[in-house]
Image (tube, rainbow, N blue to C red):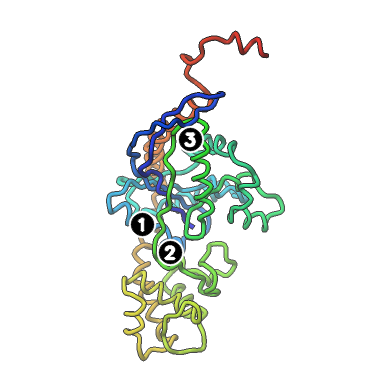
Amino acid sequence: MLKILRAAARSERTYAAKSEGLRKCSNQATQIEYPKRIFSGIQPTGSVHLGNYFGAIRRWVELQNSGEAVLCCIADLHSITLPQNPQKLRENTLLMTATLIACGVDYKRSILFQQSTVSMHTELCWILSSITTMARLAHLPQFKEKSESLKNVPLGLATHVPVGQDQSQHIQLAQDLVQIFNRQFGQTFPVPHTLISGNQRIKSLRDPMKKMSKSHTDSKSRLNLLDEPDILLNKVKKALTDFTSEVTYDSEKRPGITNLINIHSLFTGKTPEEICEETVGLNTGQYKLKVADVVIEKLSPIRKDILRLTREPAYLDEILKEGTERAMELATSCWTEVTEKVFGNDIQDVKSLTNTAKIM
């Protein structure tokens, strides 16, 4: 699930005037240009699979390589909405760092950091959570999904706002919070927007009506970036298809073979139509072998790089620390502005406490 947030766009800056302790927008406005930033994150839990790779990671790399300002967050705070072993969580954080780098995330060009090391993340989360309601949050798919499977719903789920093709309600919440905050305290945040890839979503190999997922109990349902070649081959061979031997593309009537064609297409850049033309005369069993060859060819170099990087945990830790410093530079100026507006930290604005003392 991965998540890409267009954290800055053109917006109107509205001058605000104080009224009853709140800053309300006036009619005067001028245009400002917010710096465009792309922000997203991925939890350091479970194995990274093709759905994560095509749905998020490869997209981040494409944006980075096109010159966009990209921030990649390893969302360890989000992961603790379920019980985590601290040592294992730390290892998974470093493994995710290695995975992102092996997939092409350049920590010099992008900002790659660990979510929990930037304290402003949770501090701002508290302020924003104070201006919304549980009733509003209960409409979010992520909250409903987790609350159905857990007896006690962690409060942290109420603030989890992933972004994706099926997460429009979460970004709508983020937009609502921005607008509420700006009305109450004056123009501060640009309204965020989603950047959704046009790629077909990768489906489960065992249930092609559902998306490929880390949490699926059947490990054969997903192709992991760290799977060895023989395991990848076995999973593709056992992918659920149908009884028609011809290779045709039809997402409604033939979701299983269509899923394999989509995987083939995303790796090679060929259209589904071109692939079907190339495979005339092959049955589905033969086509699975062809897909497996493509998958193994493309994933083997990534797997090799991940394993190489995992032998250097200190190096990975330094990369995260450098990313934290860069992320903190951006977060500090924003947090300073927020605290001044919410808590009135400027002593120059306090003329006298006499009236306040009399009221109390």
Foreground tag (3 vs 2):
3
Circle 3 sits in a helix, a strand or a loop, which is it?
Answer: helix
Q: How many marks?
A: 3
Vertical comparison of 89 with 328: above or below:
below
The residue carrying mark 3 is 182
Chain-order first, disc 3 or disc 2:
3
The image quarter containing residue 8 is: top left
Q: Position of residue 325 (x, y in %)?
A: 39, 36
3D distance between C-alphas at marks 3 and 1: 40 Å
Q: Amino acid at mark 2?
A: Leu
3D distance between C-alphas at marks 2 and 1: 10 Å
Circle 1 sits in a helix, a strand or a loop, which is it?
Answer: helix
The residue carrying mark 2 is 225
Q: Position of residue 126 (x, y in %)?
A: 57, 36
Q: Position of residue 346 (x, y in %)?
A: 47, 18
The residue carrying mark 1 is 102
Circle 2 sits in a helix, a strand or a loop, which is it?
Answer: loop
Give neighbour class at mark 1: few <14, some 14-19, many 20+ (Cα, 10 Å). some
Chain-order first, disc 3 or disc 1:
1
Vertical comparison of 166 with 6: above or below:
below
Residue drawn at 31 percent across, 70 percent down: 269
